[in-house]
Amino acid sequence: MYKAQITLTVPMGKRLIAKAIAVLPEVQRAFREGRILLKGGTTVSAVAEELVGSPLRISGRVTPRGTVSCNKSLPSFPHSILIYNGQIQNVDQCLSQVVAEMNASDIAICGANLVDVHKQAAMMAGAPLGGVPGQVISTLRSEGIITYIAAGLEKFAPCFLDEAILESGRKKINTSMGMSVGLIPVPGCVVSEIEAFSILASVKAYIIGRGGISGAEGATTFVISGEKDEVKKIINIISVLPEVPESGSDGSLDECLHGGPGCKSHLGCWHRDRILKR
């Protein structure tokens, strides 16, 4: 048995997860013969890059300023896409219709902002009613559509999702760093770095440490165990990950500083309140 100790930063973990989801047999089959729906987020954008070479528009995000949105409207860049017969379709304006036409053999891929102790996932919603993506993603299970949830270990928390949902809520928060958000449950199969390692090679991954400094805040340190050739596969994959930037279409990674396109519908944001008081 061969063992390697590996540390992955959060951006490296996102790219590893993307590579793993892209090679899943079910995803490859849907890519050739069916449909794949991808709902934007930095990890899912990385999946889109792996599958079709194009990143997605990033909407909401968490930064040191809190839960904020994009700096400007970028309608020419899709937030959600459908891959059908290898072709990309921007489905931002027809998402509900597209999901209604999907079959049980098709695949959906989305991200999450929280994964609890039972591996139940949820995504934050800052737009009224979660916007169209929030309304649609949570219903995919009822249509029988397989959903893969791309979520790095930084999203895992020692909490219970039901409690987190009850405590949050756009209209429950009095003041917020950025827009106040609620949580929308996302049923599906969570793929973290742990699953990604075993998808990409015949290895087992064990967490032996969390956190770091100097850019490794939120990082995870693993021991990877398996046959030497299999462990070497992982080492070869991660050796190029530090060189890859955060995934997102041009301009969409710029956060709102003086009020973004959705500012009027966002609630609780103390950054906006400070601007209005000037």
Image: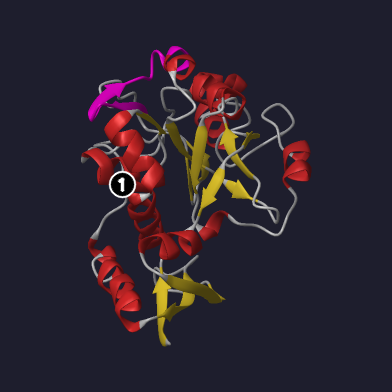
Q: Quadrant of residue 83?
A: top left
Residue range (magenta): 79-97
Where residue 3 sits: x, y (%)? 42, 85
56 relative position to 271: left or right = left
Residue at the image point whose x is 45% and y is 12% from the top: 97
Residue at the image point whose x is 53% and y is 59% from the top: 154
Residue at the image point whose x is 23% and y is 63% from the top: 243
**What residue would you read off at disc 1?**
247
Front residue of this view, candidates 153 and 181: 153
Residue at the image point whose x is 36% and y is 19% from the top: 91
Rendered position, 10 above or below 248: below
Front residue of this view, candidates 79 and 36: 36
Rendered position, 203 above or below 96: below
Where residue 249 sits: x, y (%)? 27, 37
Rendered position, 32 above or below 158: above
Q: Is residue 121 magenta?
A: no
Where residue 189 sits: x, y (%)? 55, 45
Query: What is the quadrant of the N terminus in the image?
Result: bottom left
Secondary structure found at label 1: loop
Q: Is residue 1 visible?
A: yes
Q: Amino acid at mark 1?
A: Ser
